[in-house]
Amino acid sequence: MSEILKLTQKLTSFRDKRDWQQFHNPKDLAIALSIESAELLEAFLWKSPDQVSIEKIREELADVLAYALLLAHECKLDITEIVSAKIEKNGIKYPIATAKGNAKKYNET
Amino acid sequence: MSEILKLTQKLTSFRDKRDWQQFHNPKDLAIALSIESAELLEAFLWKSPDQVSIEKIREELADVLAYALLLAHECKLDITEIVSAKIEKNGIKYPIATAKGNAKKYNET
Amino acid sequence: MSEILKLTQKLTSFRDKRDWQQFHNPKDLAIALSIESAELLEAFLWKSPDQVSIEKIREELADVLAYALLLAHECKLDITEIVSAKIEKNGIKYPIATAKGNAKKYNET
Amino acid sequence: MSEILKLTQKLTSFRDKRDWQQFHNPKDLAIALSIESAELLEAFLWKSPDQVSIEKIREELADVLAYALLLAHECKLDITEIVSAKIEKNGIKYPIATAKGNAKKYNET
């Protein structure tokens, strides 16, 4: 079994033992993901790079990933497949020639 | 090589061809992750479950995962390891006996 | 003096007494605003409307507004003016005839 | 009439002409606020301070404030009152003596 699938099973098993699947509709999972990514961002707030706690990043990034995996599971999306497809799509949106060394969004002038 | 590592290599290869590693400091990666999770949330805004576009979820969840993988890479964090450690930690924070069928946060009364 | 100006002065006075203006660059203020809006969102997570705590909304919405006022102050933006201008702009983007009873974004089909 | 009340009335009038009050439940308003604060944050992404567009800040901060006012209206909260109360509360949480020049959160060591 793939490692992503194994992680997802650990997460759904944790959830099911607590009868939490009833709360895990896609909308609330997306809200939870958004909240966790803000908590991750808090690791950097008012701080210079050397003041940031790697432990805080570790904890909050784990939460972000947990909800991302649960949402993918709920929506029957394959993570390897959707990320690979997006990379390909972005290759067209941001051709190397024009995007090189330039962080502008494709619709920014 | 593991599938997460393979995905991460696709992402860093895409980035390096565009000389974007100069922008990818952890703080801006965390900001980007937060922005993408808000775009994901937009799929659900003002909508009932049957109105939500799975295509929009697919696209935005892929972006969320891409930045999560890039941030993990930048911070030298192993995704399988940090998510597994968090599940274990949450097992202590939310014992089955008290958490069953109850979505309250551990510090909520 | 206008009430918005008075509130802003209370906020900057609070801040200056603590020597916090050194941390209040626009980027970190925008990050703080984003974090507070996620904490506000947490009031609704996994909850039906009747389970939501008005006290939590009250607290977090106050934080959101505080950072919004501080960011406006830092960027020398007049709140009444920018919100009024945006309403006018949105009147063109969302004409009553086509937008009536329809929550779709102007670029959504 | 106070300027905040006037702004709120402009916003609810805009909304009511489009029959959008049906979508404006507190949960979706809080989601919208969170999305707009992420769009505001996008003004700063991958950018040094001198590259930030004040026009983008202006636009997105206006959206943040619009949803904050609409949510306050929906929840019957008085903005001047809740922000003033929060400032007072924070005065206790962050006494000048210990908070001076120190951006640490009250529960951070």
Image (spheres, coloured by chain):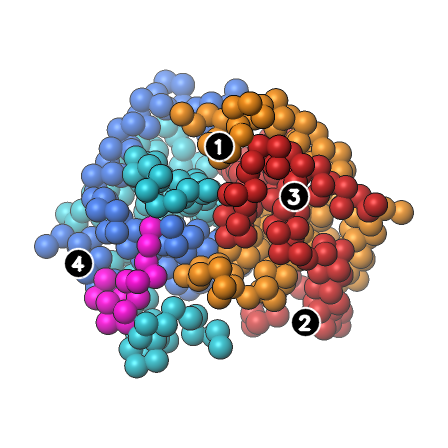
Chain colours: A red, B orange, C cyan, D blue
- Residue that label 2 marks: A93
Q: Of circles 4 and 3, which is in front?
A: 3
Q: Of circles 3 and 1, which is in front?
A: 1
Residue C83 in the image: x percent, y percent? Answer: 29, 61
> Which quarter of the rendered picture does the C terminus of chain B lie within?
top left
Residue in view at x 55 percent, y 57 percent = B40
Looking at the image, is C48 positioned above or below residue D38?
A: above
D34 vs C72, left or right, is right
- Residue that label 3 marks: A65
Check if residue A67 falls in the magenta segment: no
Residue A17 in the image: x percent, y percent? Answer: 62, 32
The residues bearing labels 3 and 1 have C-alpha atoms spaced at a distance of: 22 Å
Of the numbered discs in the image, which one, if any, rests on residue D62? none
The residues bearing labels 1 and 4 have C-alpha atoms spaced at a distance of: 42 Å
Residue in view at x 22 percent, y 57 percent = D8
Few, some or many residues within 10 Å of mark 3 (<14, 14–19, 20+): many
- Residue that label 1 marks: B102
The residues bearing labels 2 and 1 have C-alpha atoms spaced at a distance of: 44 Å
Residue in front for this viewpoint, D30 or A91: D30
Q: Which chain carries label 2?
A: A
- Residue that label 4 marks: D6
A93 vs C75, left or right, is right
Q: Which chain carries label 4?
A: D
Q: What element carries label 2?
A: helix
